[in-house]
Image (cartoon, rainbow, N blue to C red):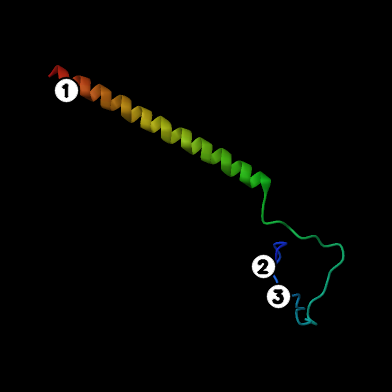
Amino acid sequence: MGDDGLFRLVAEGFALLPQDNDLHLIPGMLESSNFSPFNSMIDMIAAAHLFDMHMKVISIVDDNEKSANQLLTLV
């Protein structure tokens, strides 16, 4: 990889790739990104809800444990 972050075939210098005659450019076509900010936001919200749900379960288990300990001390 070069200093500019681009990959090259030869570490010392610039090498050209062999010509591919089967490759064609199509005018008007756009590249798509593999990153979707909408999907990422939805995933983050889902992770936050899952975290909240787990924290609530931990809180309920802790409350149940305290109640059970109180019952055991009365016996």
Mark 1 or mark 2: which comes first in sequence? 2
Residue at 37%, 32% in the rendered image: 58
Q: Residues within 10 Å of mark 1 (few under 14, many from 20)?
A: few
For residue 61, side relative to residue 54 (left or right): left
Viewed as shown, does residue 50 lie left or right of 42? left
Mark pair 1, 3: CA separation: 76 Å
Q: Are marks 1 and 2 in contact (CB under 8 Å)?
A: no
Q: On the image, which quarter does residue 28 sit in?
A: bottom right
Residues 20 and 64: in front is 20
Mark 3: secondary structure: loop
Task: Name the amino acid type tagged 3.
Answer: Glu
Q: Which mark is residue 72?
A: 1
The residue furthest top is 74
Instruction: Give the distance between the C-alpha atoms of the residues marked 1 and 2, in whole angstroms.
Output: 67 Å
Mark toward the start of the polypeptide (2 vs 3): 2
- Name the residue rendered at 67%, 44% in the picture: 38
The x, y position of residue 29, in whole percent, is: 82, 62
For this orientation, the residue located farthest to the front is 12
Crowd rating for badge 3 (residues with CA inside 10 Å; few <14, some 14–19, many 20+): few
Q: Give the residue type at disc 2.
A: Met
Q: Which residue is mark 3?
A: 12
* Label 1 or label 3, whichever comes before in sequence order: 3
Task: Inspect the image, locate mark 1, and give the three-letter code of the amino acid beneath it.
Answer: Leu
> Which is more foreground, mark 1 or mark 3?
3
Q: Secondary structure at mark 2?
A: loop
Most distant residue in the left direction:
75
Residue beneath disc 2:
1
